[in-house]
Image (spheres, rainbow, N blue to C red):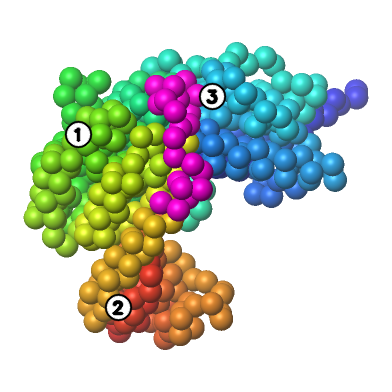
Amino acid sequence: MRRTLSAPPPIVSLISLGCSKNTVDSECLLGELVQSGLLIAEDPAESDICLVNTCGFIEEARRETADTLERLARMRKRGRPGKIVALGCLVERAGQAHGMHTFLAQADARVPFHAYRQLPQICRELVRRDSAPGCPGSSAARDGDFLAFLKSPRVRIGGAHSAYLKISEGCSNRCRYCAIPAIRGRQVSRPIEDILSEAGQLIRHGAREINLVAQDTTRYGLDLYGEPRLPELLRKLGDMEAAAWFRLLYAHPAHLSDEVIEQLAGSPHLCPYIDLPLQHIADPLLEAMGRKINTRQTMDLLERIRNKMPQGALRTTFIAGFPGETDAHFAQLLQLVRDGWFMHAGVFTYSCEPGTPAAEWPDDVSPGEKERRRAQLLEAQREVSRQKGQSWVGRTVEVMLDGVTDRKGSLPRNARAVGRTRLQAPEVDGIVLIVPPRPHPAPRPGDRCQVEITEALDYDLVARFLQA
């Protein structure tokens, strides 16, 4: 009797672009693939199919996606990857906004959110028949469907000791410059029990730091329970027996309560850290953006955070060159940065997003002026960050090790170990560079060590290990 041999499972690689929320989606996608028997390769050149989890939030992100797809297409001419599949936000946007398809021209297939659970089948069809089953377009109004997908077992990307945990999906704020509600739909919160369960699973699998993410973490639970439940969630996470750090990201300033600030300041497991994207400080700009908070309220909030969390860190982001931003508006924003409220700050130039209310207004700040203003804000924050870092010199702090580096000439004083304090989020903030000698046994990623800060760079700190 002749035995029929089944085809080997496809080998799939994945590239995750964009923010930390995309990282969570990518890990769930990998989990779906592994559960279905597909094989995973880190290198696209070793894969039958390369998945690209795209970001379509702003023009810069869309160009990064197009560049990534074009690079993969050049690799494909040399043999692998065999197929290129685009997923995620830009796929959703391409189903809504005219002209977005051009950024995805090199993809052989496009998979929107609602088809994520079909991805293993889509990959097999691509390998077997050289074409994918049809996937309808945009699916932003899917409510709880995506939350079911988030229950997928996750195959972690990066170090096991640091993880992101998504507490809700979508956004209901409707800021006038932002396409996220059109891409991701309205906010839908995950049940507290699901979040606590996933946090426990992450910790059991090695996570020692968990960063809470959502499009707006401060409105967590409003849709599900009829009132915001972030304070309750933080309290229950802070009471978990496992000694992990929890950090709050993406908190909308109009909805941040004093109770949340006090919890972040007082719990040993909650990092005294708030990521608070202000976007601007001038009243006319805040009103035009639809931020639901004014200058006076913003300054009152900053004062309360400083008073309640004096040893904490505040991170923010700004938009430079929003329509109608005058020299006077920008000067007000620049002064806010120079006043030293923020330990960390990022700046984006305004990107006109099709389908948003702001897209109907004249984009009256030139590209060159947007870049000039962005550079000025970043330079002002660089000075503030260095000054704040210098105040840490001589202090003993706890750091969590991320690993070691093999760079030699570019690091100060032969630093080898790299870590972060509770006031430094992964990927977006500065780091602590730790010089030899290392304690014995050598620390591993996720270990916490006591170090003495010896030097402050622009954004990073230099430290030495203290003997145990």
The amino acid at mark 1 is Ile
Q: Which mark is residue 93?
A: 3
In the picture, measured across the screen, residue 22 lies left or right of residue 86, that is left
Residue 349 location, x and y as percent?
45, 44
**Magenta region: which residues?**
352-373
Q: Quadrant of residue 219?
A: top left
Please tell me whether residue 132 is drawn above or below residue 160 in the rendered image: above
Whole-percent x and y of residue 115?
Answer: 56, 20
- At label 3, counting other C-alpha atoms closer than 10 Å, the crowd grade (few under 14, some 14-19, many 20 or more) is many
Q: Are marks 3 and 2 in contact (CB under 8 Å)?
A: no
Q: Which of 198 and 71 is in front in this view?
A: 71
Residue 138 vs 158, above or below: the answer is above
Amino acid at circle 2: Ile
First of labels 3, 1 by sequence position: 3
**Residue 386 relative to residue 24: left or right:** left
Residue occupied by mark 2: 453
**369 drawn magenta:** yes
Give residue 405's mark: none
Residue pictured at 62% horizontal, 23% vertical: 99
What percent of the width, then of the height, locates residue 257? 14, 38
Residue annotated with mark 1:
293
The Cα–Cα distance between marks 2 and 1, rounded to whole angstroms, is: 38 Å
Kind of residue at disc 3: Arg
As helix, strand or loop, the secondary structure at mark 1 comes to loop
